[in-house]
Image (cartoon, rainbow, N blue to C red):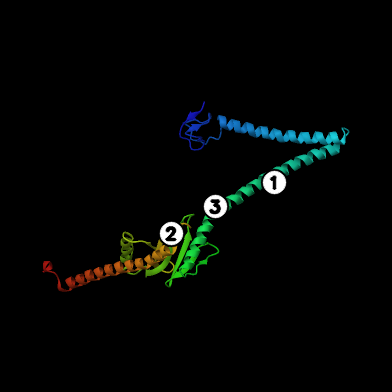
Amino acid sequence: MTKISQCNQCQIGKGVHCEYYFPFDDSDCTHFKLGENKAQEKRLSLSKYGYYLLLIACYLIVRSIGGWHFNFVYEVLFICGLGLFYCFAKVLLIGGIKLFYYLVKRIFKSYPYMEIRKVTISTLKNLGCQPEIDKETGNMSFKYQGEEFFVVVEAETIITFYDTWWGTLDLDDPLLDNLKEAINKTNMNAMPVTLYSISENENKLGVHSRYQLIFTKDTPNKEELFNAILNSFFEVHQEVKGRFSALNDIQDKKEEKERIRIKGFSNSER
């Protein structure tokens, strides 16, 4: 009798388990004894017997052709040869099928990726860019209005533009928190998304931007779309810089007031 429980190890279908599973035992259960599994095991055993019967039939045919007075040594060698031929043919057939399946799967899986890469490259060239492909990563780099960009094909229909290290600031700079706040405020109202990373070796905080979009060969006005996206990076640059400068001005005015108050004292301290 099968049991219904919450075993993730031997679950088949909607919570159906084999007869050897006990709900109070949390150990793995590998005994599959359901009808489908029994039928599958039966088919496999019949196929094995079929191979054995085929070998016996070949042996009997050869004996009948060569006469029943067959040398014992030749019989042993012939049977061993049939066994080796069977094993070799089985391995070769299974290996060939697996290799063919792998190659077909690889081709069909990579085709959309290669197609979108080809369309991306042609669109960039139509904008006057000269994309270069990194042989190790497959990423494309190009320059647009003097700025170096990267574009990565993330999936069959998704690509991402990157503008990395377009701004830096020392980690010990007192205005570092203002830059982080400027980045956070910009992300609330603008695209592309701006983020930062920290390089301990160079003692720098780097500012980066990225824009991800759905892009296919059927996307209309590809050149206009790329042109608008790439121009938006420069708009975000100005947005972050403007907010950063405004926060610095506020901080300078606050510090100036603090210095004046300390120098002249306040009325409450007299």
Q: Nearer the viewer, mark 1 or mark 2?
A: 2
Residue at x-position 78% and y-position 40%: 80
List x then y, in percent, for residue 57.
Answer: 77, 34
Q: Secondary structure at mark 2?
A: loop
Q: Secondary structure at mark 3?
A: helix
Q: Is residue 103 placed above or below 85 in the rendered structure?
A: below
Residue 200 left/right relative to 90: left
Q: Position of residue 269 (x, y in %)?
A: 13, 67
Instruction: Compute the Cα span from label 1 to label 3.
Output: 25 Å
Quarter the C terminus occupies:
bottom left
Quick check: 256 left or right of 78? left
Q: Amino acid at mark 1?
A: Leu
**Residue 193, image quadrant:** bottom left
Q: Which mark is residue 109?
A: 3
Nearest the camera: 186 or 71? Answer: 186
Q: Which residue is mark 1?
A: 92
Q: Residues within 10 Å of mark 2 (few under 14, many from 20)?
A: few
* Direction from residue 2 to residue 84 in the image, left or right: right
Q: Position of residue 178 (x, y in %)?
A: 30, 66
Q: Earlier in the sequence, mark 2 or mark 3?
A: 3
Residue farthest along the right direction in this orientation: 69
**Viewer-side label of 2, 3:** 2
Foreground residue, 213 or 192? Answer: 213
Q: Position of residue 234 (x, y in %)?
A: 37, 68
Residue at 27 percent across and 68 percent down: it is 246
243 sits left or right of 49 in the view: left
Distance from disc 1 to disc 2, alpha carbons, whole Å, reads 49 Å
